[in-house]
Amino acid sequence: MSLEQLYQQVILDHARQRHGNTVPISGLPEVPRPPYFGHSHQVNPTCGDEITVEVERREEDGRIVLRWDGQGCSISMASASVLSELAQEAKPDEVAPVMAGFQALMHSRGQGAPDEELLGDAAAFHGVSRYPARIKCALLAWKAFEDALRQASADYPDENGDRSTGAGRNEED
Amino acid sequence: MFDAAEVERIRNDFPLLGHYQEQEAGGRRLAYLDSGATSQKPLSVLEAEQEFYERRNAAVHRGAHQLAVEATEAFEDARAAVAGFVGAGEREIVWAKNATEALNLVAYGFVNASAGLGGPEAERFRIGPGANLVITEMEHHANLVPWQQVAAHTGAELRVIPVTDAGRLDLERAEALVDSATAVLAFTHASNVLGTVNPARRLVDLARAHDAVTVLDACQSVPHFGVDLPALGVDFAAFSGHKMLGPTGIGVLYGRAELLDALPPFLTGGSMITTVDYQQASFMPAPQRFEAGTQPVAQAVGLAAAARYLAETGMDRIAAWEEHLAGRMLAGLQEIPGVRVIGPEEIGQPGDRLATVAFDVEGVHAHDVGQFLDERGIAVRVGHHCAQPLHRRFGVTATTRASAYLHTTEEEIDVLLGTVAEVRGFFLR
C-alpha cells in the first residue's frame, strides 16, 4: 500500500479546510449553554494530540449541531472535519450507522471494503486501518463525538422515547 | 572518531541491523534513528544473557548450592562492571527495573523520610512546607512527575529552571531559583528532546552551595559519552539499560554510599531485610536495602556486557562520531525550507550537544512526518517524547526526533535529510 493511498487527497484537503472547526463554547464561561448540550475533550497521550467536540441537540427538531477544535496530525484533523460534515444537522439515528460503519472500517486491518454511500468522505480513511499506530488518530474525534452526543441526548425528549444514541457508550476506541 | 570501515564493523555486531541489510534486496531498508527511545543490541549482550541462562541460572543471594554461588557471582560481577563504567563503587549501584523506578526510589525515599521513617540518619531527607524542589523545563516526565508527587506529599514547592529559546538552561535563573530552602536539585544530564548537554558540574556546585541533594537523569548521557558520576559530584543518578545497548527490564540507580545507607527504602519485602518480626523489620545496608524481591539477574549480566562493549569501543570515540553526525544532521536540517530545529542549532563547544535532533516541519504534523519517513525505512520518534511541558514551551504539541548512535552512518543521515526535504511537497500538495 502506498502513502498516497493512506493520505488520499480528500484527507489532506479536509485537514486543511476543516469543516465545523470553531471555538468551542465550553471554554467560554460568558456564553450560555444550550439546553441539550454535551462536550468531550479527548487526548491521545502518546502524541499529545487533542480534540474538543461539542454537540447540541436542536430544541425544535433534535438535530445535531456540532462544533470542534483540536490539534493533531492530518489524519485526526481530517477525520474530525469529515465527521462534522456527516453529523451536522443530522438526526442521531441517522449518524449511528455511520459511526458503527466507521469504527468497523477502522478495525478491519485493511480488509474492509468501505461503504462509500454510507460513509461519504470517511470512506477515504480505509487505508488507516492498516496502520495500527494511526487508528487512534482517526477515531479520536469520533470518540469525543460519541461522548458529547450521549450527554446532549441524556435529557432530550426523543419522540419514540428512545434515548439511545446508537453506538454503545463504552465501545472501545 | 570512527571511519566508515569501523562503523561497518560495528554494524556487523548488531544482528538486527544485519537482518534488515539482508532484506534490502526485497525492498525493505532500515535506517534506525530512534536509539534515543531504545537502542539495538550487539551480539555480545544477547550471548551474555543466553550464556547465563544456559550455564549459571539460579536464585542469587539465597541458597548454598554451587550453582547459586555462581549465579550470585555473575550478578555481583555485573554490578562491579556497571559501577566501573560510571566510575562508581559497587555498593553505590542499585538495580531497578528501569530508570523511572530508580528516580521514584529516590523520590519516595524523601517521601518516606518526611513521613518520619528511617530514623535519625534519614534527617537530611526530611522536607516539608517551606522547602523547595528544583527541576528544569527540559525534564523527561520521569524526572518531573515523581517530584510533583513529593511536593504533593510534603507540601514542598516545585520550582522550574527555564530553558532559553536556544534550548539551553537559563543558568542565571537557576542561581536565583536554588536557595537555602532547596532540598533537591533534579536535572537531566542531556535532554532527550533538545539534545542539550547540561553543565552538570556547575549545577552540582550551585546545589552544594545550598546544601541541596542533586539527582541526575543520566539516561541520555551514560550511553553516549564517558560519564564519571563521582567526578561530577552528583548525589544520585539514574540511567536505563535498554538505551545503552543493554536489555530492557533493568535500570540503574547510582547514589553516594553514605546517602544510600541513610535513605529509607522504597520497595520493601524479601531479600532487603536483616531481621523481621510481625510488627517491624530492619533493613540491609545499600544496595540490598533497595533490592526487594527477585532481581533482573540475566538483565544485569546483559547490561554488564553492554558496558564492556561500549568501553572496549571507547566512549570518547563514540562521542566524537556522534558529534560528527550531529553536526551533519543540524546543518542539513536547517537548509531545508520550513524545518525548524527545536534545541541548540549548532554544537557550541565539544560535548555540549547530542546527536539527538528534534524538529518541526511547518504545516505538517510530526505524526505525518514520521509516517512519511517510515515509508522510506527511516525509523524516528514522533510525539512529545515524554516531555509535554517542554513542547508547550516551544509552542508545539509534537516534534519529529532523529537520534543516532555509534552504528549510525553518514549515509543514513543523508537519507534522512533527503527524505525530510520531500515531506512538505507531499503533504501540502
Image: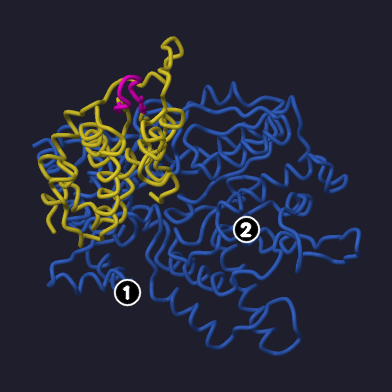
Chain colours: A yellow, B blue
Mark 1 neighbour density, 10 Å: few (under 14) some (14–19) many (20 or more): some
Q: Amino acid at mark 2?
A: Ala
**In front here: B42 or B117?**
B117
Label 2 SS: loop
Residue B129 on image: x %, y %: 75, 27
Q: Which residue is mark 2?
A: B88
Q: Is residue B327 visible?
A: no
- Does A56 lie within the magenta span? yes
The magenta region covers: A54-64
Marks 2/1 in contact by CB < 8 Å: the verdict is: no
Residue at 35 percent across and 25 percent down: it is A57
Q: Quadrant of the C terminus of chain B?
A: top left
Of the numbered discs 2 and 1, the one sitting upstream in the chain is 1
Q: Amino acid at mark 1?
A: Pro
Looking at the image, residue B260 sits to the left or right of residue B41; the answer is: right
Looking at the image, residue A165 sits to the left or right of residue B213; the answer is: left
**In front here: B6 or A169?**
A169
Residue furthest top as drawn: A30
Label 1 SS: helix
Q: Which residue is mark 1?
A: B15
Residue B67 on image: x %, y %: 66, 88
Residue at 74 percent across and 79 percent down: it is B62
Residue at 18 percent across and 44 percent down: it is A119
